[in-house]
Each structure stands twice: as structure tokens, then as C-alpha cells.
Amino acid sequence: MDNSLWVKMHGGTTHFPIALVMASALFDLAGSLVPDNEGKSRCVGLRAAGYYTLILAAIGAFGAVISGLVISRWQLWGRGNLAHHHTFLWPAFGLLTSLAVWRLVVGNHASNRAFRAYLGAVLSTACLMGAAGYWGGELLLNN
Amino acid sequence: MSLEIKGAILGLIAGLGVLGATFGLSPVFQPKKVLETKREQFDPPVSLTTNAALTGEANRGIWLFDHNCTHCHGEDARGDEGPSLYNLSKSDARLRTIIKGGIKGEMPSFVKKFDDGDIQALIAYLRTLKD
């Protein structure tokens, strides 16, 4: 396939995991802060939104990583802005996969304490994703 | 074992597994040229091993090159997606114009990224790249 098509594909696919993991973190954070109404749980709805957006982010991340590897000729680190991009990307990718599997296994049965720990981890993942996206943008603009 | 612990163990395995697979499979798909470039890093070309002999300007050019140009021109400047930068015959003025304005459809403009001093430093470094 033409390399420029992979570049376009990476540009398209990469924004889904970034946006979705941030949305997931925000939904879950809101779910743990917003008080529940009697008989109508906002918390459950927000956590469900957080759950599905995280799973979609993890699935999307695979497309973004594969297309990114193709355009960087399977370089896992590189130099300059590419190295900065990868420094944040690999931990984010590993964490995102781990968190998605954890939520798939645990579902709605997490204790408050475990969910708070999860929330910290997903917020960290969102920050790492944002930083990886920033350096990816620098690559695009300056290279 | 609680569901949360089971999930954490499976999550850890999955996270490490995808990273392991990515890092393990990457060399299989890597084009031969990239692998050769990596090997050359342990035995860099003469022009890169004699940094001490270069002017301060050229040394600054190496840093600028590393952070902005290697993605297309290769880590050893011998070309990758972009052409090799060894033995350039273009004049300094022409190189300055290309770096500033780019080449439509081939190379981006660096006019916002580099000032005249940066471009001069880059050119000083490029002039050291000779076989």
C-alpha cells in the first residue's frame, strides 16, 4: 500500500483512542462525583459510557499503532520528535490494553477502592496519550 | 481470588503481552535498510565520529539535524524517505531557500521553526557530510 495512505490512515485512526480514552476518564470521573437520584442512577449510566468508550479506545489503539509502525518503518524508538512520541506512546498503549482487560473482567463489580485506583490509572493513561499525540503533531508539523 | 485481582493479573498480562508482541515482531517487519542503519550506529561514519574537529556551528547543526531531519533523511543522513544529504553540490543560498521554503509535495517548510542562525548551523553540518 502507498505510504501516504498509511500516513492518512494513522492521522485518522490515532485521534479515536486519544479522544475516547479522555472521554472515558471524564465519564468515569463524573460518575464517581455526580450524586445519584433516587431510583435512577446517573452513576451507572456514566460508568457504562466510560466502559464502552474505553473498550473502543483500546480497539482503536491497535489500528493507530499498526499504521504508525508502518509509516515509521517499524522503528520502535527513533530519534528527536519520533523518540518523544514513542516515549509516551508505549506506556500509554500498554496501560490502555491492561485497563480495558481489567474492566472487561471486572465489569460493574469493582469496589469503590479498586475503582478509585482504576480512575487514577485511566487519568494517567489519558495524560500519556495526550503527550504522545502532542509529539505526534510535532512530527507532522516539523518533519 | 477476587475478581478485581484476577482482572488486574489478566490486564497486566495483556498489557505486557501486546508490548512484547510489538517489540518482538517489529524487527521481523523492519526493512533491511533500517536494520543496517542501526548496526552502523555502533560504527558511525567518520564525519560523525570527528565531532570534536567540527566548528561549534556545525556541532549545533548536528543537534538540529537529529531533532528535525532524521525522520526523512535517515539517522546517518544517507537518506530514507528523503534523499541522502552527502556530497551536496547545491550552493548555500539554494540550501537556505530549500530549508526555508520546503519543496512542494516532498519536503515541509522550516521557515517558522528555524531562524537564519539555525539554518546556517545546519548548512555548516551538511557541508561536513562527505564520503
Image: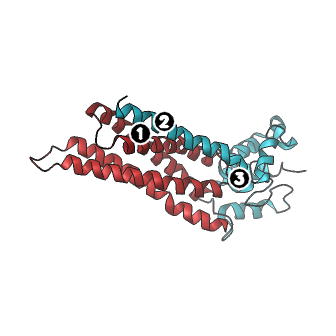
Mark 3 lies on a secondary structure that is helix
**Foreground label between 1 and 2:** 2
- Do discs 1 and 2 belong to a common subunit? no
Above-or-below relation of A59 to B15: below
Image quadrant where residue B100 sits: bottom right
- Identified by mark 3, the residue type is Phe
**Foreground label between 3 and 2:** 2
Q: Is residue B19 at all visible to an observer of this figure? A: yes
Q: Residues within 10 Å of mark 1 (few under 14, many from 20)?
A: some
Residue B15 position within the rendered picture, expressed as x and y whole percent measured from the top left: 51, 40
Tell me which residue sits at (38%, 45%) in the image.
Answer: A104
Image quadrant where residue B108 sits: bottom right
Q: Which residue is mark 2?
A: B12
Residue B29's tag is: 3
Residue A11 position within the rendered picture, expressed as x and y whole percent measured from the top left: 53, 61
Residue B55 position within the rendered picture, expressed as x and y whole percent measured from the top left: 79, 40
- Do discs 3 and 2 belong to a common subunit? yes
Q: For marks 3 and 2, give the CA distance.
A: 26 Å
- Identified by mark 2, the residue type is Leu
Image quadrant where residue A99 sits: top left
| Number of callouts | 3
Write down the chain letter for disc 2. B
Colour red, chain:
A
Q: Residue furthest bottom?
A: B104
- Identified by mark 1, the residue type is Ser
